[in-house]
Amino acid sequence: MEVWQSSWKETLRTCLLEAFCDSSESTATNVGGLLAQLLGDRLPGSAPGTADDSGAWIASLQSPHPDEAICAALQVVEAAYQGSLAKPDELAESLLLLLGRGGGQAHAAAWALAWLGFDQNTAMQGSRRRGRNRLAPPLGTQHSTDASATVWQPTAQHVQTLLDALTAAGVSATDLKRHLLSLLARAADQGAVLQPPLLSPALLAALDQQLTAGLVRNEKQPEELRSDGLVVLALYGRETQLLAIAQDADVPVALRRLAIECLGLVASRSPAGQQRQRIEEFLVAQLRGDCLDLLITGEAGWAEHDRRLPLLQGAARALQLAAAADLPLLGNGHRRPVPMLSLTALQKEEGLHLRSEVLVREVWKLPLPAGEQLELAVVEGDAYLIGSPQTEDGRDFLKAFYPNSEGVNFEAQRKLHLKEFAMARQAITQAQWRAVANLPRLERDLDPNPGSFAAKNLWEAHGQPGGLPVDSVSWNDCQEWLGRLNRWLLEQWSGLGGQGDAPQLALPGEGQWEAACRAGASTPFHFGDTLDVSWSNFDGNYTYGAGRKGPYRQRPLPVGAFGLVNHWGLAEMHGQLWEWCGDQWQPDPSGEGWPSDGRPWQGLVPTQEGPGRSPFKSAKLLRGGSWDSHPKYCRSAYRDFYRPVNRNDLIGFRVCCLPQD
């Protein structure tokens, strides 16, 4: 900044512009970010895009001098990042013209356009909360309840310009292509271009050529770009192209799996009819066509697992996406059977025996405000044994942390007698949380966007928007959220088509949670004797049983990402995020007053003390482990706790419907 404010300013500006325009420089985007920040120091006094300065701003963007046009575009980046753009639509037209010039001008223009799709009224708030920076424009439109939100959305008429720029971009221009793909996805997600009259056959052919042949099948392109290209094809409904990629044995398995999942996305966005039926029939055939039955004794066995299981997972996830479009309302008598995929891994003397199974489970929906919905599955009423045997690895871990714990059985085995109840198939998502958090308050305020994680690719931004599980919600926040939702259901139930009394939702008791997680299994995980990062989201630096090491993702994934369920049809019960239960923490669940019907335990106040001598008095139960957990913390029987006022990015929740008395 000192050099920028000195007589060397123009020299520094020239050097930075040269580095930014040199597409062979891997640091070009970093240089552009620095230049945007420096140029932001002299932003016009009035907000860019306002009547006072829009003419001068547009003139700079349309300047025949590349340096001036690039600097103007980078100033748009900085202004958008700071949340000070008032009229993005006017600037967008000039930036689209600049996009056609290619090179550094196209890069700067695409970068600025990507930022224009973000609600300027919440830009700085989102940037601070999620650690966003100038180099990473939001991939999706920021949700806002502000009626004055200023968001630019590309139209069908802009698609040809974006495709032309994609055609002209060199192989090494990965950042430019990333921004262009994001813009194409935003145009499709807006819905306008999905109407056939707005897209000519020539334009569709260009889209197929550039995304299918030019990007997805181009081995020189990074896999992330190839994946984003598949999502854009799905958003434009390109069933034929996705089918061809899904069935091509020469395409990497990860891309084939994503192509299959994208077919589910196409089906979910299509009206009921021949296309959806055709896709679902293909997916069912894929799911049933290659049952996994492996004995893993070494790397070769895991390699076979990694070659075959992902395609089954993709088909299962796609079927669940497609089914979500027409699920029956909870309690209305109609049934919607959905084919699902389960996996069992049992340790035998000769090795680890893995077996996949296709289950057909009935799924219901429960409408939420703003067009969102919950998916629920039924846990059968029966007697269940929960807790862990004395021989289970990891069961005594808590004793090392708590003084005076001699004789305390943290994972005591005990028998439950449960009534049938319905449980959310997955954790509550960011979109579901937002829909309810915007309802009128009861006793406390709720942040509609509390999550610590933003979409990192086009699937998360447009394929499954808001589909990351919500995190950083306290137990008290969850109670307020549930109260608002239950009130809304009571008021709206008959209008939603509901029959009988409106369902009432709650956090599950830990007995309900563990019985739902185990789904009849007596092993440490509902999968069996071990856990793998291809089935669950945990810290892959650690193993359990005969498991192997794998990646540590350091974040949650969209719900349903693994395409695997337990016997009830519930997903992501191990890892991903810790889940609140309704119970007060009790170190030894075998004590007097423990509810054998699975209801939350609000019993005697514990007398032991935990780390830092903090009392357990107000703590609430956590179950399931998280993306940051050692797999032994993800076991079905593992119990942990946290204060009800605390929040962090490892904790979320799922809900259940209270059993009818």
Image (tube, rainbow, N blue to C red):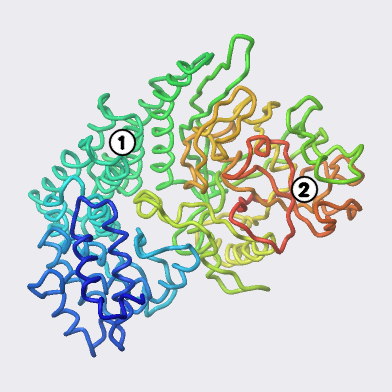
Observer-nearest residue: 379 or 648? Answer: 648
Q: Amino acid at mark 1?
A: Ile
Residue type beneath disc 2: Arg
Q: CA distance from mark 1 to mark 2?
A: 42 Å
Q: Which residue is mark 2?
A: 599
**Residue 489 appears in which quarter of the rendering?**
bottom right
What residue is at 54 percent from the left and 19 percent from the top? 354
The answer to whether residue 182 is left or right of residue 60 is: right
Quarter assignment of residue 249? top left
Q: Quadrant of the N terminus?
A: bottom left
What residue is drawn where x is 50% and y is 40%? 335
Q: Secondary structure at mark 2?
A: loop
Give the farthest residue toward the bottom.
Answer: 52
Q: Residue furthest front?
A: 7
Neighbour tally class for label 1: few under 14, some 14-19, many 20 plus, Cα within 10 Å: many
Picture residue at 29% right of the left edge, 58% below the top: 29
580 relative to 68 in the view: left or right: right
Residue 515 drawn at (x, y percent): 70, 37
Task: Using the rendered view, name the quadrant where residue 95 is placed.
Answer: bottom left
Q: Is residue 638 visible?
A: yes
Camera-side residue: 258 or 17? 17
| Residue 383 visible from this viewpoint | no
Above or below, comparing residue 436 to residue 232 in the picture: below
**Image coordinates for residue 385, horizontal then vertical, percent:** 77, 31
For residue 279, the mark is 1
